[in-house]
Every structure is written in C-alpha cells, then in structure tokens.
Image (cartoon, helix red, strand yellow):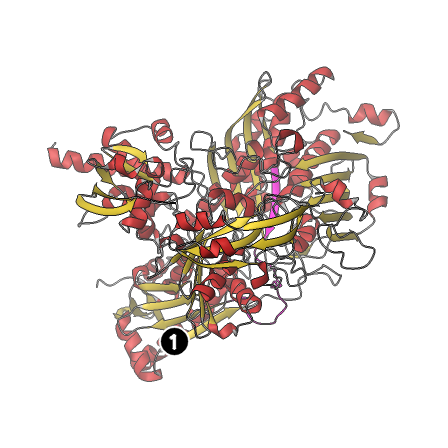
Amino acid sequence: MARKSLSDWKSDQALIGSRMRKVEGLDKSTGRAVYTDDVALPGMLHGKILRSPHPHARIVSIDTSRAEALEGVHAVVTGRDMPTTYGIIPWTPDEYPLCVDRVRYIGDGVAAVAAVDEDTAIEALACIDVQYEELPAFFDPHESAAADGSTPYIHEPRKEGWNGNVTKMVHLEFGDVDGGLEEADVVVEGDYLFEGTTHAALEPHCAIGQWDGAGRLTVWSATQVPHYLHRELARVFELDAAKVRVLQPLVGGGFGGKSEPFDLEFCVAKLSMKSGRPVKILYTREEVFYAHRGRHPFHMRYRTGATSDGKLTSVDAEILLDGGAYASFGLVTTYYSGQLLCAPYAMPAYRFDSTRVYTNKPACGPKRGHGSVQPRFAFEVQVDKLAEKVGLDPLEFRRRNFIGENTRTVNELRVTSNGFLECLASVERASGWTEKFRRLPFGRGIGVAGSTYISGTNYPIYPNEMPQSAVQMQIDRSGRVAVFSGASEIGQGCDSVVAYIAAEELGVPLEWVRVLRGDTDFTPVDLGAYSSRVTFMLGNAAIDAATKLRKTVQKAVAKVWDSKPGEVLLAGGYAVWAQDTSRQMPIAEAFNLAEAEFGTLGATGWYNTPKDVHGEYRGGTIGASPAYSFTAHVAEVDVDVETGIVEVRKIWVAHDCGRALNPVLVEGQMEGSAYMGFAEALMEEHVFKDAERGRAGLHNAPSLLDYRLPTSLDTPELESLIVESIDPEGPYGAKEAGEGPLHPSIPAIANAIYDAIGVRMDRLPFTPPNVWRAVEKARADENLGKPRAPGSTSLERDRAAGEPVSAD
Amino acid sequence: MRRTTEIVRLQVNGDLREVGVPSHFTLLEALRYGLGLTGSKQGCDKGDCGACTVIVDGAPTLACLTPVWEAEGRDVVTVEGLATPSGPHPLQDEFDLHGAAQCGFCTPGILCSAAALLSSNPDPDRDEVREALSGNLCRCTGYAKIYDAVEAAAGRLRESARGRDGP
C-alpha cells in the first residue's frame, strides 16, 4: 500500500456523492433478482378472487358448495370468514378483506378459492353462486356530496344525520384571506379538473400465505409497507403480532400503489389456514387497475390575489376529491390537498376547503406526490395567469415570491434548507428561457413551474413515540459489514443508501457490505416506502448505527497506536493515522482489535422526527416534515392547433435534493418523476364507463395498452439539474428526490401550451380531443394566438377602468 | 373440464429441456413455472408491456403471446442466458453502472430487446435504440438512463469485436 497524503485518504473516503452501483443492480440485470411471483413453495396452491360485477349492491347470499366440491379445490373463503374491518388509517377502517354484505365497486372481492392450479381456481370461481340486490350507485362526486339519504349511502354515516358519502371535510384558514383578496391589485379565478391517474407499476400485486398449523403465519408480499401489513394481519386474524411474519421480496415498482394492505394478502393467509398449504395469488393486470388507490380526481376552484408589483396577497381554494369506494389514505389526502401548497412562495393569507366523498368506483389513494400534484397543477397555472396580469415574466414572478430558508409557511410548517432560487436559475439558464419566452413562433412555447414536497412525515400513521426508522449493523471478523434493514426497496435504491453509509463510515469497500432486508422477523421496524421518507430517515438511522461502530473501532486502534481515537481514519479498506498516513492497518485487522477489546461488534441506530415543526391546530401535524425539497421545471412544447396534438420537446428538471448521496440514483428519480408527470399531463386517464358507453362503473381501459402510458418513442428528452442546499438535519445534508420532481411537469406543460398558442388548459389530460376543443373555443372567441410579452399587458387598461382585474 | 398436458422440448439458453405443461401454456409460463427460469417477467399477460420479452431465433419475442409449442425446435435466449461464465453481458453491466434498472421488473425484457438490436446493429444511434425499445414499457426511469446504458454497451461490444479482429 503506497503512502498517501491525508487529503488523498479523505478523497478516497468520499463514497458519498460519487456515482456508484446499486447493491442489487447486477441481480436485477441478470435475472437473479427475486420478486414475489418468483417464489415457489412446496405444495403451493393457486388462489383466485371472485369480484363483484355490480358497482353497488347488497350481497343476498353466497353459495360456495359447488366450488368446494370441485376436484382440485382445497379451500373457499368468503367475507364471513374474515369479518373484521381494516384500513391503513387507524381512524377509518372501512374495508373487509372480502365483502361481507355489500359491494361498493365493480371489482370488489366477494369470495376466494385455492386450488391445485390456476385453471382449476378459475373454474371454481365460476361455480360460486352470488345473489345480489342492486342498489343505486354514485359516480359523480358532486352528486355524492349532495346525497340526502333517499338512496343508501355508500358507507353508514358516522353520526345520525350526516352524509355517509363524505369521508372527510377540512376547512383551514390562515391570515386574512378576504382582506387579502380585497387589497389585491389583481385577482385571478379559475376552475380546474385533474382527472384521476393510476400507478401502473409493472409488477402486479402478488402475495403468498403460509400457515404452519401451530399459530404462525408467514406472508410474502409485493408491498411497500411490510410493517403496516404485519399489524393489520395480526389484527384481522386476532393473532399475536409476534407470530406473524411478513417477507418482502424485491418490489417491481410501487409509486404509492402498494402502500396499504390489499384483499389478496388476507385471502392467501385465510386460504392457507383452511387448506393447510401455502397459497399464492397474483393479480391479473385488470385486477391491478381495479385495486387502484391512484391519484384522486380533484375538482378545484382557486382565487388568487397579487399586488401590481407581483407579490401574492391571498389564496383561496375549494376542492372536491373523488375518493372512490373506500377511505384508503383519504383522510390524509384531504389535508394534503391544501397543506402542501404553502411553499416555495410566501403567501400572507391562505384558505382551503376540501371535501372527499365516496363514489362507487375503485378506491383512490396515494400516488407519487400524494394529494399535492393536483393542487400544484392548478396553482402554478394561477401563478402564470397572475404574472401575465401584472406584466411580469412568470419566472421572475416566482422569484419575487420566494419564501426563503429557515422560515415558517403561512400554515406554520417549519422550512429549513431551501434551494428553490437556484432551481429557478438552473432551469432558466439551461433552457435558454430569456431568448424563448414569448419569442418562439406561434405553435411553439415554453413554460415554467415550481413546487415543494415533504421528506417524510413527522408523525407516523398510527400514533406512537417509537423511532420511524432503524437499522442494525454487525461487523464480521472478515471485514464484512451486515446491515439489517426493514426499509422497502421498490427500485428507489434504499438498500444501496444504507450500504453506501456503512461503507463510508466504516471504511470498507462497498462490496463488503451485505444488506439483509425484507423480513419482519429479523429487521428493525421501518415504516415503509411512502411520503419520500426513506433516504432521510433510514439514512439518519444508518449514520447513527455506523457512527457507534466506528467510534468503537477508532478507540481500539487508537489504544494500540497510542493516539487519539479522532485521529484514526477508516477509509478505503484501511485504518490510517491522521498524523502520519504511513501508519495504517487493513480494516479487518482494526475490526479484530475492536472485537478483542470490546466483544462482538454490533450496533443499532435509529431516527425519530423533531416534533416542534408545525402549528398547534387540528391537522397542523399533517404536512409537517423534517425537511422540504424544492423543484423547478421548464417545459418546451409544440402544439398543432389543427389536431390538438401536443408534443413535449424537452423538460429541464432542477431539484434541490439537499445533497445527492449518489447522483445516479437522484437523476433517476428526477427523470422518472418528470416522465410520470409528463405522462399524466398528456396521456393518462383513469376513467370509467357511464350507462351510455357500456356498463356504468366499468373501467374504461384496464390494460397497459388502453390505459395509455408513454413508450420510449413518446417520452421527451429530460435533463436533470441537481441542486444541493445541504439540509442541516438530512443524512449528509440529503432530502427527498422521489416525488417532488413530479409536481411541476404538469403545470409547466400547461403554461408552455399557453405560451405556444394563447390557450389555457385548465383540465387534464391535454389529449388531442381536449386540446382541440379548447383551441376551437379560443378560435371562436378570437383568443387564439401568441400571448403578449411582459411589459405589454392588459393591466394598465383594466386598471384605468377603475375595476379590480378578474381573469377567466 | 378435461385438460391435456403435453411434453414440449425447448432449447433454452443452450440447454435442451423437456417440460410437461398444460397445452394452452405460453412460452412465458413454461419458462417461469415449468423450468424455473423466473428472470422473464409477467407484467400484463397480453403483450402490452414487454416485460416477458425473450430472444427467439435472434428476434425479440413476447413470450406471453407465444404458445409454448411454437417455440419447439427454435433457439430461445432469456435474460439468464445473456451472461457468460466469465461475467455479465456488457449490457447487463452497463445497466448496473448507469442506474438503468430501478425496480428492475422491465429490465429482463428490455435487455433482450437491446441484445437483439445490438446483434443486428452494433452501432445504433439514439433514435434506433428508442425504436427498438418501444415495445418495452418502463415505469421508473423515463428511459434516459436506459439509452445511455445501451449505447455504452454497444461501444464496449464494438471495442471487443475490434480487439478480436485485430486493428
């Protein structure tokens, strides 16, 4: 080993921030990686679920006798076998593993079978006789909200006289909203519609249940939340949680679509209990579309005021959320629809009035950017309209309203690091904004939008004071470091993040770290892959554990070298003395010294959130996060006004992720997010047939062909621009990167369409028919054309008339 | 309902294998559930997503739309057959280096489409790569890193071909 200077040693150590492989990367590219459907157990049976053909009906009777008598069928279960409600939010458990007496959407599960093979299971489903009494159904959220009980509500009202179709209402007001609107020089009003979208992760949901006949239940599942699944399995089956084990093989994408328990996980468990055999259920792609839990359709109305010099004065929002048949995360979604809007712009006054209603459609839930992508679309278009009214470049308007760092939002959320201005500068520079805005030929346009998102939630889903994330680390005499991690690897790279941290802190080569994962029997609890919490919380937990071990090793080596522990560096496979780098020993030798001195080397580490970072009001904890990421996008589009076809040429994505622990993974999250936002803007439409177009409540396009997803030929060029604000509490300064960068895609595209042809797109998606209709209306109103550049606005004219300006 | 089971002979990744499967099985089902080659994935089961793509007689083929008997007597290569004993295929290695696999579920199919492309076109430009992968949906990456990985692998393969052939 050649002698090296101290600075060389330190740069060797710099794994964090460098471009690294993922720990499971080669497994994934060689076909070795194991997903749930790749697991086969001896004697395993195949399960299938019978689903309701009606959107709303009473179950009069279920006769399973013919199915049970079928050769090869080992078990049949119905809702009466599992008559306990569950739900991811402890206050709204409104689902049964299988429906007991009522079905609430086409696709609701009513019975399940386990048979020797898939063909027999399918045949058995056809032998189950279910008698239904159909009920009037609600498909329109406005009608659902106006229900008076003359036909049965979708769920029983929680109180006499309430509308049982309402999941949640939230009304919050900060500052003087009406005064702020009155004082404003300009007020913009707009109605917006965000049609729902779904996750469409490529791996369908899959689960395997194994009951050992002596009280132990094991479930393998493609879930993003093994811990919550563990809890709900124990609760529904009244088992000791200590005797329930959840295994999570690698997950083939989630995006929020696997963030709560689903019927198949309970069914495989119960079918295994009845048959005494392991049972697997794999959803068909059609079942995945009906399981849904995707982005809620939002009907939104915004009134936004600003001064003539471009400062926001007041924001007023009314939102109706179409929740589908069950609550899912809906309570949180209803809060998020308003709570996450209060940065990156300072707003002196803000009010939102959000109502989530049930409808007889598949349940909506969290999708990447939970509850905040829809209002962000509407609000960033509002901002664009305001900027135009006051005659400002929309990028400058955003800059002027920057909320700053180390501050509080109007709804009292604590903001620490904030790189939003750098994000704006970054996309401005890279896109050539100044030369392009309002200067491109008719039909081509450029648009900007900004956003913020949480790096995890300060409060776990069920109230408790325990750590939100934890790891256990062990050092072997060989130099190998084993990390036991309960975090959910869904492709975002969390297994790699703990490995990078272990290698960085303990000075071992990355290849010497083993991440042992996906098993509630031996990993400490991590709450799951949702709300962009994992890198922040798991990362801090890993640093905690690794630091404890590092200090032990430093102490042991320092004793031998007769130096101070702080002078012992662990890096690049060696322990090195900071005073004289020629003094060194292989890291395994250092570990052996420490083991001899202090005994077997292991440590746990954990992270819990600060709890003083939100306002003291009902709902004030929801939206509170230890840190917020910031994003700005510029999109450039071509619009063909004859066909309504919008082509996105390029999206520039600048994201403040605090610190990029591995830029490869951060860019991947940024590009994947921008792609997904682009997809929602232009192509995706999670809609249902009505009575005129077939059977009401039937999914319009439950396949990966008909539900349009961008292929490689559809996806625009994406350029990632990483901004690092170095968060004071994040691991090495890191914040989230998985969800924030989705938000601005949609409004940036909408604003670019306006720049191209002068037409506002206030409803999603921007499909050719929708764009064409908007173009035709603008043509009729003589509004089609390149909008005027800032400086030549209509503001002066309107003010001269002495009236407050109101647009749209 | 009476069902029939057939013994089919498949040439997969260089091995001649016999497997008894229901006669309606697809090549994908035979590979995954008959032969235990679970690298090829099922994302949709109707030819929409491309996760099941394997190489049959040199051409990228949707295994979920191929009746198993149609693959008899033909040369089938799956993701498990791309590597050699000396290491992963350059495509596999570059996918890892570039972060082209996030969740990894579309990866086996994309690798087979890309390998088939590079065997017929060793120096594709980006538009040719996009075209060749247009039957494979990826929901994680936005495709950008996948193009980078395919182009890097193509470069390595050309390099080693030059090495073999001499200057």
Q: Residue at x 59, y 16 (%)?
A: A642
At x 54% / y 35%, what residue is drawn?
A701
What kind of element bears circle 1?
A: strand
Question: Which quarter of the figure is the N terminus of chain A placed in?
Answer: bottom left
- Residue A231 visible in rendering: yes
Q: Amino acid at mark 1?
A: Gly
Q: Quadrant of residue A564?
A: bottom left
Q: Is A708 one of the magenta-colored residues? A: no
Q: For the magenta stretch, what is the residue range?
A: A449-469
Check the residue under mark 1 and report the chain it is in.
A
Is any part of residue A758 visible from this angle? no
Q: Residue furthest right?
A: A802
Q: Residue at x 82, y 25 (%)?
A: A798
Image coordinates of residue A230 in percent, x first then y, are 51, 66
Vertical relation: A755 (above or below) A680 = above
Q: Tell me the quarter of the picture where residue A332 sits.
A: bottom right
On the image, numbered disc 1 is attached to which residue?
A: A602
Q: Is residue A454 shown in magenta?
A: yes
Does residue A302 lie above or below A87 as drawn? above
Tell whether A178 sits left or right of A277: right
